[in-house]
Amino acid sequence: MPCSDTNGYNGYYEHLKEKLANAEGRPEGGADLYQGASAAIIYVNCKQDSTVPTHEPVGGTVKVAIHELIHIHQVQALSGTLTSITPPTDTLGDSRFQVKNYHSACPTLYEPAIKGVLDAMPASMKLLTVPTYILVVPETTGIGSSSQVTAAADELVSLMFPNDCAGVTFESTWWYKENGQIAEGEAEYYAANVLMAPGANAYNDANTQWDGATAWAQRASENTGMVEDASRKQLFHIPLTYGRHNERWSDKLSCLDWHNNPVGEITYNYMKTVWRPATTHAEMQQHWITVYNAATYEAGFAVAFGQSWQQFVCDLETHYGIDRRTQTCAGVEVAPNITGVACDLDHGGNGDGEGLSGGAIAGIVVGGLAFSGLLVWITLAYYFRLWPFRRPLGLAPSAVATTEALPMLVMKL
């Protein structure tokens, strides 16, 4: 059966062309993966005025690529396709990470910078057994004319689906166990503060020289300012239970000006600096596998970390002086008081949160197993605090997921 006859393919193909054309001229990162596909795709943006590898946006773009790769691993685990964090035998070598800069729309220096840093990452970040293509697109425009966009999209789908989509499906089965806030916080913390910190990546140290630790510290400072601002802190909210309403949680956060990125970063920073400082990236990776094997996200969290999710949220709200903490600590979830806040919760605001949500990031072969059935479309409008994904991009039970919806789901990562 040709791809054009496969349910969900046409939606994905149009999404791919939209990413390449970037008609709205906005920076949005993301990743696409179908279960059963022969490749993974990550989207990042470039600054067209970059002339040297040490230009700050170059390293920032590389960080986004790592952030997206972490999201891919999270979804692989939640979908049951990644069952071990032990790196598989590397059969890809130099072809594991490949950069696509169509028509040199971006300064060519982005190509070696992205590939060099990704290749130099530790084996723990090389869990896939299919190639990952990183598409670099100008943040304010696309890669070229309409015909050039179509030609590029055709090449990419031939790489992802070389057998006319045989074995590829578009189904979402994992998103209701996803905790978008923890997913975002984990991805940003490790991409910046660990994997691109000075001394962590030889290629970055020698070439791009992007200081991820300083970038994370600055972000953490800005986030702390938000959660300590008396006029805003009481709207900070993370749910006690996750499930089929996940999409609406992210909508509400975005609507109330608390997007998944800062919420997730505040949440994970609290975990790393106060609640459980010894937590490692390996433990976070394993915890998504544990969640997959549990009935709910909360149950998996308790097994992974020895304390309940409710206790974690209780402690976090107590730490930051959130008024609802008494009810939270008693196991009663209370929504933020939005009296006087201009926010239409029925329509979810701009749906921009970034995180995993609603789609299925699949389509890769991990540990030698081919995925069959999910598309995850992690789309992060991740640059320069323009975060949150737009609904039409992600994974969402309804459509795209701001990286939560495939085609359709998109994941808000």
Image: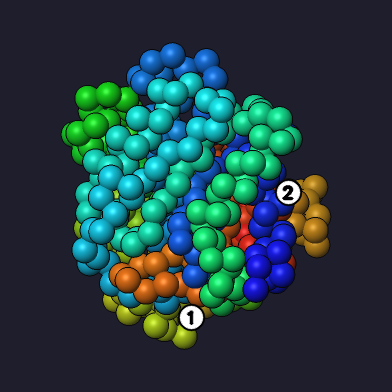
Q: Residue at x 33, y 47 (%)?
A: 95
Q: How many marks?
A: 2
Residue in the foreground of this view, choosing between 181 and 131: 131
Taking 402 as reference, is 87 above or below it?
below
Residue 62 seen in the figure: yes
Q: Residue furthest bottom?
A: 295
Residue type beneath disc 2: Asn
Taking 259 as reference, is 168 above or below it?
below
Residue 361 seen in the figure: no
Residue 296: assigned label: 1
Local secondary structure at mark 2: loop
Q: Residue at x 32, y 79 (%)?
A: 303
Q: CA distance from mark 1 to mark 2?
A: 27 Å
Relative image position of residue 175 (x, y in whole percent): 56, 71
Residue type beneath disc 1: Thr
Q: Is residue 252 left or right of residue 321?
A: right
| Crowd around label 1: few <14 · some 14–19 · many ≥20 (10 Å) | some
Relative image position of residue 149 (x, y in whole percent): 66, 38
Which quadrant does the N terminus fall into? bottom right
Residue in the foreground of this view, choosing between 232 and 130: 130
